[in-house]
């Protein structure tokens, strides 16, 4: 059976997506835990207290507290330079609402009631943190994030290799 190609006028967009496939892969690796968190929920706030983000676990906890509070600009400061670059340039092209939209879905529209760090492994200037997010609707999602030290601080990292 022979299939005829149907042209929907999307050739330019398809070429752009193909050109950016390595970046897309890297974003998907970063987003897999976030996408699994995307369900609608009731709007509730975690209280953010002043804390010392001296450990990778503190960075993850603070990042999710900030996005839960819809403080997206502040949350982006916890991303590595490369992650920020990808979030600002590529995410708006592939995710409805860009970073803000993805974070609203990841927090179930700000309904995280608890962020529990379950493990942390540090090796030189790299770390991985495992965590559980507990939501107002009683659900729980688990994930992990990789971090690197950048300009003397732990930052959430996006890589093509993990």
Image (spheres, grey):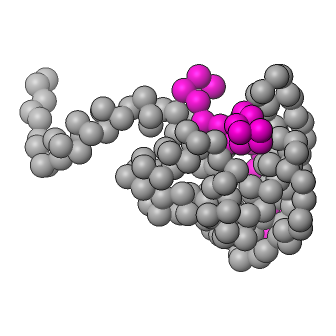
Which residue is rendered at x = 75% and y = 57% of the image? 64
Image quadrant for the C terminus? top right
In the rendered view, tell whether residue 118 sits above or below residue 93.
above
Image quadrant for the N terminus? top left
In the rendered view, tell whether residue 149 sits above or below residue 161.
below
Residue 49 placed where, x, y %? 89, 67
- In the picture, residue 11 is in which quadrant? top left
Q: Nearer the viewer, residue 144 or 146?
A: 146
Which span of residues is magenta-colored?
135-162
Is residue 15 visible from the viewing direction of this image?
A: yes
Which residue is rendered at x = 63% and y = 55% of the image? 76
Is residue 36 visible from the viewing direction of this image?
A: no
Residue 16 placed where, x, y %? 27, 39
Q: Is residue 80 in the magenta section?
A: no
Q: Residue furthest bottom?
A: 43
Q: Is residue 17 left or right of residue 8?
A: right
Q: Nearer the viewer, residue 112 or 53?
A: 53
- In the picture, residue 39 is in which quadrant? bottom right
- In the picture, residue 21 is in which quadrant? top left
Q: Is residue 108 left or right of residue 59?
A: left
Q: Is residue 152 in the magenta section?
A: yes
Q: Nearer the viewer, residue 150 or 133?
A: 150
Q: Is residue 11 left or right of residue 48?
A: left
In the rendered view, tell whether residue 58 sits above or below residue 151.
below
Residue 89 placed where, x, y %? 42, 49
Residue 131 placed where, x, y %? 83, 44
Which residue is rendered at x = 85% and y = 50% of the image? 53
Which residue is rendered at x = 59% and y = 22% of the image? 161
């Amino acid at each position: 059976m022979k299939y005829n190609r149907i042209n929907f006028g999307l050739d330019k967009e398809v070429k752009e997506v193909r050109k950016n496939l390595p970046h897309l892969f890297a974003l998907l690796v970063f987003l897999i835990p976030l996408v699994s968190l995307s369900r609608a929920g009731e709007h509730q706030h975690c209280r953010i207290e002043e804390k010392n983000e001296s450990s990778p676990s503190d960075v993850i906890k603070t990042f999710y507290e900030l996005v839960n509070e819809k403080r997206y600009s502040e949350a982006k400061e916890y991303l590595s330079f490369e992650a920020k670059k990808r979030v600002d340039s590529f995410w708006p092209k592939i995710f409805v609402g860009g970073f803000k939209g993805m974070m609203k879905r990841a927090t179930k529209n700000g309904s995280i009631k608890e962020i529990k760090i379950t493990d942390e492994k540090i090796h030189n200037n790299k770390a991985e943190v495992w965590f559980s997010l507990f939501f107002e609707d009683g659900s729980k999602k688990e994930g992990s994030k990789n971090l690197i030290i950048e300009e003397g601080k732990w930052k959430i990292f996006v890589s093509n290799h993990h």
